[in-house]
Amino acid sequence: MGEVPAREVLWNITGHWLIYPCFVAALAVAVVFFVRRWRLWKIGEPENRSDRRAERLRGAVRDALLQVKVAERRGPGLVHVAMYVAMIILLIATATVAAQADLGLPLVQGDFYLYFLSLTVDLAGAAFCIAMVACIVRRIANRALDTKPGDIVVLGLLLAIGVTGFVLEGLRIAGTGDPWSAWSPVGSLFAGLFASWDQGQIELAHRVLWWFHMALAFGLIAYWTYSKLVHVLLVPAGVYWRDLKPKGELPFIDMEDEGLLSFGCGRLEELTWKDLFDTQACVRCNRCQDLCPAFATGKPLSPKSFIQDLGAELEQRGPIIYRLQKEAAAQERNAADAAESEKASKAVPALPKAEALLENADLTDAERAIIDRPLVGAVIAPETLWACTTCGACMEACPAFVEHVPKVVKMRTYQVSMESAFPPEAQATFRNLENNGNPWGLGWQTRSKWAEGLDVPTIAEAPDAEYLYWPGCSGAFDARNRKVSAALVSLLAEAGVSFAILGNEEKCCGDAARRMGNEFVYFMLASENIATLQAYGVKKIIVQCPHCYQALARDYPQLGGHFEVIHHSELLARLVREGRLPRAREELGRVCFHDSCYLGRYQDVYEAPRAVVRAAGGSVVEMGRNRRASFCCGAGGGRMWLEESAGARINEARCAQALDTDPDLLATSCPFCLTMLADGMVSADSDVPVRDIAELLAGAEK
Amino acid sequence: MNIVVCVKQVVDTEAVIALDGAGEVELMGQTMVIDPYSEFAVERAVQLKEELGGTVTLLTLGSQDCLAAVRHGLAMGADAAVLIEDEQWTARDAAQAAALLAEAASTMGADLVMGGWKSGDTAAAQVMGRMAAIMRLPLANMATGLSVEGGTIVAECEVDDGVETARLPLPAVVAAQQGLAEPRYPSVRDVMRARRRGAEVRPVADFAAASKPTTVTVVSRELKSGRCGGRIVAGEAPVAVAETVRLLAEEAKVL
């Protein structure tokens, strides 16, 4: 066989040039559908997601091109990667054939032909078809996937293209007596089917099927941006436009701006374009829902449905808003032109406010019904909005980097600030925060009582202290958490750390208020705290509550408060490492560690608290849901202060997971988690103690 | 229907109270709030306005500092407010306060005068009753329910061991008890709207009742002593019970 391995491209096909106009037509359809989508998210508020390009590109390469995040989920994630690789190989093969046929490049020959175009593509095609069949079976078998007809259409179309491709290859091999057919093992199998056919039958069948195969492929291209396949474009874009701000940072609302008439999101178009884009990029993969503690315990919240419901509303509301915005912009231009041509000194009349624009718009009754329905109430149920613990498990899991939690908070902000609509029990919390600066409403003058007899100076007494210790409301007022404060104080004293407290001048950090949507109360608390801290010249702050951590480190900079904040887990781990605190005083046995969402997922602190547990003599055992996949205790996002009436209790579900590890102790490093898990253990009728890591290290276990 | 609601500003109910050298309650640094009983009255008044139309006007005796409570009431939905500005308001007794408020209210054309049956701080429970007497209007005291039926009102009033439902002609005075209405939490939108509705400030000197002499003078104030903790009587049950009975009889002298 001295001959160079090759095959005739476009064997048996005449007039193949027709595919180019067809291709252009199909692509045009795809572009039209894409523009329709683009117009939908364009109605959102502006937001800059094009800064830090290098970082964005790196992220896109990692999580879109290389699919690292997709592959994090074994099973379906790896099948997706396989499909993706096979698809790329098939695309390269198609492009190569086209390049030879119409550009005259001699590509379909030699080793490249044998190893890649024949063998690799043959196997990739087979893998692709098998994956499609597997996906169709999975979709039919697994009811939880919430399969829609479109999902099956897409898979069926892809499978049909793959199978017709193989049949075509078989016909070609049979019809040409291809000497290199051994390099196309699957194609050869198909060729066997036509062994008894005569040449005329083969050629006719091949020609007909070739055009059918092409029709399917162009159909797919046309359908591409209409169907879920648009994720091929949108997910990489979403990955590129990911949120690069510190995790958990909420949009800044300037409460001192007197021109600000509304805040939060009460209408869909008050979300940002990226928020609306997210609803388009979501492929309903279920990863968020699988990890959501609210969903897992039967609450009326699925992060996936939340995004999908917003998306469905966008499909209806978006085109109307787009038209109205366009008309308003045209009017504004005309008004500006008119003003210019008249050279009138009078100011151009102010643009109609968005609200007035909608009220006065000329709409049909059907359109009016869509425009007038409220976002919360008609699109998102209030129970859904308030079920979220803002734990962030959904966002951590999402391969498209959809941002669920900020949308929830923005909508809560509107509900509370503009409509005064929230679960009734939140009112007492809000009033308590306003009047006494703590959620329990205990007299603010009693805040420093926890420190009585502990030899803890106030910053007024010890202005030169290196650290300000911030026990937070739980550490100061809650009987159980006061023990944690006492343990921490003893450890700080033992390690010779110079610290002082604000005492009665400390107020709630405002985290719960802000995440419950009460931006006004948050602003009052935060600005007072910042003023107090700055008056004392505080630079470094020790917190024991991850929620205070989030507020002081990530929320306060927006209001001009810049402090170096350290969580007690990090400080204690460091003090142990430096030998300033002794290690194990006793064997603690199996210590199951629960990650607080706001310390773990929000601040990326996972190892420090575990190091403290080990230093305290515990051997750390992990629950299945740990670290980035940790399962919330149920208290985040202000849920600590709300009733939990729907479904099972989240803290009890978490305690059951902890008890499965057969622990001697359950440890955490967040006062809310401590309260919730201790309650959960009582409900589970378990005597496994729940402790903060500081208590363990201080030997308060005896 | 025009409703006048008397609103008082008080120290937050959870506050730790201290006395200054002169025996006066130290107000420096204290959180001042709208009196909870006044707040029930404002809420029900605003609800009635929303049901039936009309206006709700707040009426406050106090210093400029009391405007915070007034603004809260405006944010809850009241339409207007009148402040009888008086720097010495805390020194006035209930009779004077009632006379001043009644004098102001009688010029406001009120169909209904409302207020808290007592206040969260001094809890004297005098002012609304005295106002009714001065204005010669019927009084529904300790009202936990209030509805308007034609030209009359039907009020549910707490009495010892029960509730009395009474029908009163208008105009009338209604003194609110807890349970009359659950006060709303004003949204920021409400607060901003309330900012535009200022209070009309009228100097106390303009009122004839201001010259009425004080009849009650506070001689001294004393803070309640804090709870001094329980005592645990140890020992076997029969012994401990006997000892407890002895202590109750001899030391506590309650038996």
Image (cartoon, helix red, strand yellow):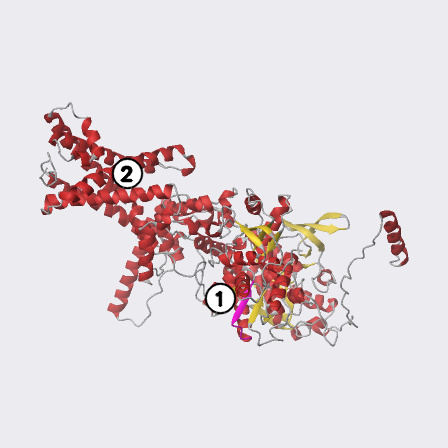
Magenta span? A536-543
Chain to which mark 1 belongs: A
Are labels 2 and 1 on one chain? yes
Name the residue at 11% across, 24% down. A198
Q: Residues within 10 Å of mark 1 (few under 14, many from 20)?
A: many
For the N terminus of chain B, the quadrant is bottom right
- The one nearer the camera, A391 or B160, is A391
Residue under label 1, please give it: A556
Q: Please give left or right for residue A172 compared with residue B84 in the image.
A: left
Amino acid type at image mark 1 = Tyr
Tell me, yes or no, whether the highlighted magenta stretch contains residue A691. no
Tell me, yes or no, whether the highlighted magenta stretch contains residue A542. yes
Secondary element at tag 1: helix
Answer with mark 2 or mark 1, whichever residue precedes in sequence: 2
Residue under label 2, please give it: A128
Query: Could you say where residue B207 lies in the image, as x and y percent from the top left?
Result: 67, 72
On the question of residue A146 being in view, the answer is yes
Query: Could you say where residue B137 lies in the image, as x and y percent from the top left?
Result: 71, 58
Amino acid type at image mark 2 = Phe
- The one nearer the camera, B170 or A130, is A130
Q: Residues within 10 Å of mark 2 (few under 14, many from 20)?
A: many
- Which quarter of the picture shows residue B57? bottom right
Is A96 rendered above or below residue A514?
A: above
Alpha carbons under labels 2 and 1: distance apart: 51 Å
Query: Could you say where residue A403 lies in the image, as x and y percent from the top left?
Result: 41, 53
Secondary element at tag 2: helix
